[in-house]
Amino acid sequence: MKNRIRALRKAKNLRQEDLSDILGVTRQTINAIENDKYDPTLSLAFGLAKVLGTTVDELFFYGNDNTGGE
């Protein structure tokens, strides 16, 4: 599943470590999600969306459907 996490994180001047600390996960988890290696749990997806100031459906999209940006 593709996502806009990296772009939104950088726009808020957050490092992966900052985001992981806020959400209570490891930096490696954030890295894996940003690189499409891991799909987050639903609760983590909602947490990411809240911290990044967006909605889950705006944050994640499938395949070549890049209507979510990036």
Image (cartoon, rainbow, N blue to C red):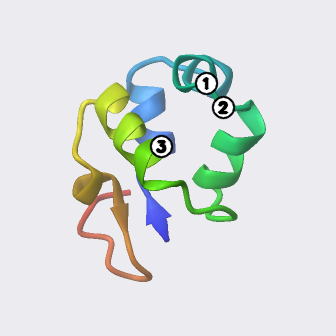
Q: Label 3 sits on what residue type?
A: Leu
Tell me the kind of residue under disc 1: Gly
Residue at screen point 53% across, 18% down: 22
Question: What's the residue at 48%, 29% (across, down)?
Answer: 10
Quarter of the picture holding the C terminus:
bottom left
Q: Secondary structure at mark 1?
A: loop
Determine which residue is flagged by label 3: 44
- Left or right, 32 with respect to 44, comes to right
What separation in Å lies between label 2 and label 3 (alpha carbons)? 9 Å
Name above or below for residue 36 compared with residue 23.
below
- Give, as a three-letter code, the residue at label 2: Val
Question: Looking at the picture, does residue 49 appear above or below residue 64?
Answer: above
Disc 3 to disc 1, C-alpha distance: 9 Å
Which residue is labeled 2 in the image?
A: 25
Left or right of 32: which side holds 22? left
Q: In the shown orientation, is residue 20 left or right of residue 69?
A: right
Circles 2 and 1: CB atoms closer than 8 Å = yes
Residue 31 picture location, percent across and down: 69, 44
Determine crowd level at label 3: few under 14, some 14-19, many 20+ residues with C-alpha closer than 10 A. some
53 to the left or right of 46: left
Which residue is denoted by mark 1 in the rendering? Answer: 24
Query: For residue 56, which numbered disc appears in the image?
Result: none
First along the sequence among labels 2 and 3 = 2
Give x and y (percent) for residue 52.
Answer: 34, 31
Label 2 close to label 3 by CB (< 8 Å): yes
Q: Position of residue 19 (x, y in %)?
A: 55, 24
Residue 6, image x and y in percent?
51, 42
Question: Could you classify mark 2 by the number of other residues whose Cα lies within 10 Å: few (under 14), some (14-19), or many (20 or more)?
Answer: few
* Residue at screen point 22% across, 46% down: 55
